[in-house]
Amino acid sequence: MVEKSTLDGCLKDIGFPADRDELVECASGNSCPSDVIGQLRDMPSMSYHSTDDVLCRLGDISYC
């Protein structure tokens, strides 16, 4: 499971809403760990409205 603090660092420059490809591009540019980038890449191609929305989609139901 991805920690909120890790995801916040990975997506620190993102503007929401953002789609999956924008999330992956931002995370890659912020030297995010490859396992987190892989999880972002595997998410459905849709619009996400916040880091909480992303965490929910990544399986952390406490953010849903």
Image (cartoon, rainbow, N blue to C red):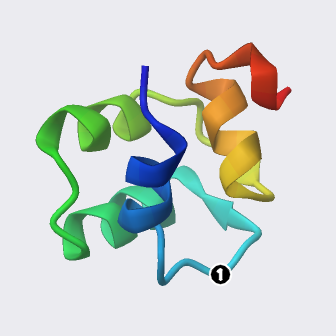
For the point 51% across and 30% down, the residue is 43
- The x, y position of residue 19, in whole percent, is 62, 58
Q: Quadrant of residue 28?
A: bottom left
Residue at the right extreme? 64
Q: Quadrant of residue 38?
A: top left
For the point 17% across and 46% down, the residue is 33
For the point 41% across and 39% down, the residue is 40
Q: Is residue 52 left or right of residue 21?
A: right
Q: Secondary structure at mark 1?
A: loop
Out of 53 and 48, give the one closest to the viewer. Answer: 53
Q: Is residue 22 left or right of residue 47?
A: left
- Whether residue 46 is visible, yes or no, is no
Quadrant for the C terminus, please. top right
In the depicted structure, whether residue 11 falls above or below residue 29: above
Question: Could you classify mark 1 by the number of other residues whose Cα lies within 10 Å: few (under 14), some (14-19), or many (20 or more)?
Answer: few
Q: Residue under circle 1? A: 15
- Whether residue 18 is visible, yes or no, is yes
In the depicted structure, whether residue 9 falls above or below residue 2: below
Q: Amino acid at mark 1?
A: Gly
Quadrant for the N terminus, please. top left
For the point 74% across and 53% down, the residue is 47
Q: How many marks?
A: 1
- The x, y position of residue 13, in whole percent, is 48, 84
In the depicted structure, whether residue 59 falls above or below residue 30: above
- The x, y position of residue 60, in whole percent, is 64, 19
